[in-house]
Image (cartoon, rainbow, N blue to C red):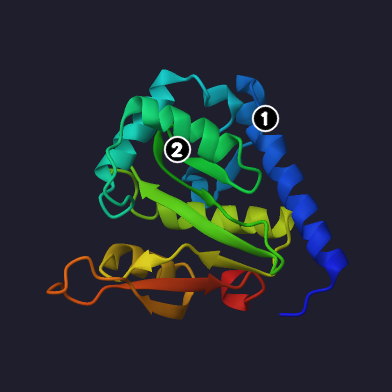
Amino acid sequence: MNIPKDEIDMYKARLTTTFASLKQINNYDEWMQKSIPIENGLGKLRCICELHANDDDIIGMLALWRDQATTFRDGFKVTFEGTKRWLRDRLLDVPDRILFLVMDSQDHPVGHMGFDRSLNDDCILNFDNLIRGVRRAPPEIMTEAAKAMFAWATDAIRPRSIMSTPVMGHNINSIRFHKFIGFKLVDKKAREKKDPAAEDEYDLTFTYDPDSPQNL
């Protein structure tokens, strides 16, 4: 992909300034004002920011969700302190990473999603960190939240495309989710087997085109 350097530079500048402006929020009123509405009155998206760096309730909730999401992590032990360090070192201090809480219509957090590893010369945003933390939430809220986040990012950052973080081949629910909201499979790579007797496993990568008519 041959993208002019000035377009790459402008994409990176928009990304870093947009993400930083949300992640540096440390005032509750500003945090509420910077919400991204989800269609059909289902709720809002709100960025995890400096306001939450020492918020034990939010950190504990994130730790619980990460611990329950067995298809999301890869064998590490989830702890409160580890999640607090992750929030600082792997989220707030990373310029091309952002995470949004999905809030329902009653303003209760029910999941999260965001972008990661997106400072690249291909101008591609990487969709990442998708977790549905509350099973009783409206079934369509995560789908509509993703569409709202993509629309916001397309307008604010103007990427060439949005890619998924590789999805494990056995994660049927995640594969269905990605396809339902407009992602298309673009790559399939075999994972290295830890057990020679195990069935083949693959990582699947999907792409979402912000300019595709069905996604507008």
Tell me, for residue 33, which label it has, or none. Answer: none
Mark 1 is surrounded, within 10 Å at the Cα level, by few (under 14), some (14 to 19) or many (20 or more) other residues, namely some
48 sits to left or right of 25: left
Q: Using the numbered discs, state the Cα–Cα distance from disc 1 to disc 2 in whole angstroms.
A: 25 Å
Which image quarter is the C terminus in?
Answer: bottom right
Indicate which label's residue lies in the foreground, 1 or 2: 1
- The residue drawn where x is 40% and y is 79% is 188
- The residue drawn where x is 34% and y is 33% is 63
* Position of residue 209 measured from the top left corner of the image (x, y, whole percent): 61, 73
* Position of residue 138 measured from the top left corner of the image (x, y, whole percent): 34, 48
Residue 2 in sight in this render: yes
* Position of residue 135 measured from the top left corner of the image (x, y, whole percent): 27, 45
Q: Earlier in the sequence, mark 1 or mark 2?
A: 1
Q: Quadrant of the rendered structure where residue 212 is?
A: bottom right
Which residue is labeled 1 in the image? 24
Say what secondary structure mark 2 lies in. Answer: loop
Say what secondary structure mark 1 lies in. Answer: loop
User: Which sits in the foreground, 216 or 116?
Assistant: 116
User: Do callouts 1 and 2 mark residues in contact (Cβ within 8 Å)?
Assistant: no
- The residue drawn where x is 39% and y is 55% is 140
Residue 44 in sight in this render: no
- The residue drawn where x is 17% and y is 75% is 199
Count all numbered tags in the image, as a single digit. 2
Mark 2 is surrounded, within 10 Å at the Cα level, by few (under 14), some (14 to 19) or many (20 or more) other residues, namely some
200 sits to left or right of 60: left
Which residue is labeled 2 in the image? 105
135 sits to left or right of 152: left
